[in-house]
Amino acid sequence: MSFVNDSLPHYPGLADRTRPFFSLSYPVPTPHNTNLLPQWQHYGKGYLDACFVLTWIIFFSVTREVAMSYILTPIARRVLYGTTPTVPTPSNGVGQRPKSHRKREERQRARNITRFSEQGFSLIYYVVYWSFGMYIYVNSPWAPYKLHELWIGYPHTPLPGPVKFYYLTQLAEWCHQLIILNIEARRKDHWQMFSHHIITIGLMIASYMGNLTRIGTMILLLMDFCDWVFPTAKMLRYVGFTTGTDIAFVIFLASWFLTRHLLFITLIYSTYRHAPQHIPLRWSPSNGLYLSHSSWTIFLVLLSILQVLMLIWFWMILAVALRVVTGRGAEDVRSDDEEDSEGGSNGQSGASVQTPAETRKTQ
């Protein structure tokens, strides 16, 4: 980050203008009474933070494209199909499949490779950021689960460097995901996902500006755990490891229920019960107080809507769990609309689409 600014010694004005894009803005002395990561440089907040978020949106977009094109896609092609680049065609014509069928299989191979690569990138991202969130959590005054500490001492500003970096880069990734959601093939739950992303981004911006980053980091930590278990299950399914897929899916199911319902509901309860006990519900921006009765109510409503959306997904997950219990194996019901259109008139998404392992068995 400092390299960019140091490389412009003859243009100090330009260096000052670019600094917010590559480093955290508003450094301040560490408060004497802070109880969260006091050993780190602390930072205030302001409009220049948007520059840092923009840089990281671009960074995640470029990193994802480069990683998928030059690292994850070659790995996916090798793992899923070995050295066979295309669908084999008998040279004597005996048993030769129709050309349209071969093209469909080639498209399915390309889609499988892309999906495997996407899940690989998600796995890497969420392992890194869940670990980052755990670092903040274990060093926080609210660990192991002292929810009152999320509100005591409000407003929680300035922020330790790791917390500000974590929050802003997570916001950048959610914005990046929203872009990806609208340019890639749409899934069955596109509008639920779109609503979820909009609400999450809105909550993150509001909680950051309103000095509610403590409960925000807890919510992100709870959300991120499932988000690295699920890609693991999908990647195991793509390689044909049925037992591993089902085990990973059971872990995903249990962790989803624990983190996104039981624990998340306790955070909603804490917002409802504990926040008014420790925070004067009044609007006073000059004193860092942004949680008036109205904004507190809106915050509660948005958290509740998020919970409703996750309940809808949990119902979909239970449908997949039923497949596991009945011996049909775990299968993602969030399939592409494109796959549904190619899957025949029966409307059973995924039923007519073969995994790479199933394809190898039929050849």
Image (cartoon, helix red, strand yellow):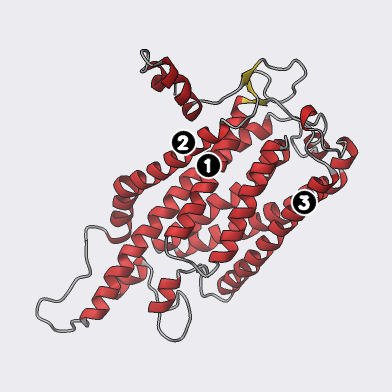
Residue sitting nearer the eye, 134 or 44: 44
> Disc 1, disc 3: CB below 8 Å?
no
Residue 363 visible in the picture: no
Q: Where residue 159 sits: x, y (%)?
A: 67, 27
Of helix, strand and loop, which one carries label 1?
helix
Determine whether 215 is above or below 253 in the image: above
Q: First in sequence, mark 1 or 3: give its number.
A: 1
**Label 3, label 2: how far apart the Cα atoms are:** 30 Å
The residue at the point 87 percent across, 46 percent down is 273
**Label 1, label 3: how far apart the Cα atoms are:** 23 Å
Q: Quadrant of residue 189?
A: bottom right
Q: Left of 162 or right of it: where is 54?
A: left
Q: Quadrant of residue 360?
A: bottom left
Determine whether 284 is above or below 173 in the image: above
Of helix, strand and loop, which one carries label 3?
helix
* Amino acid type, mark 1: Ala
Residue sitting nearer the eye, 346 or 242: 346
The residue at the point 68 percent across, 37 percent down is 209
State which quarter of the image contains the N terminus. Answer: top left
Q: Which mark is residue 55?
A: 2
Q: First in sequence, mark 3 or 2: give its number.
A: 2
Q: First in sequence, mark 2 or 1: give its number.
A: 2
Q: Which mark is residue 298?
A: 3
Q: Where residue 247 sits: x, y (%)?
A: 55, 60
* Amino acid type, mark 2: Thr
**Label 2, label 1: how far apart the Cα atoms are:** 8 Å
Q: Which residue is mark 1?
A: 172
> Disc 2, disc 1: CB below 8 Å?
yes
Name, please, the residue furthest toward the top. Answer: 10
Neighbour tally class for label 2: few under 14, some 14-19, many 20 plus, Cα within 10 Å: some
Q: Left of 121 or right of it: where is 318?
A: right
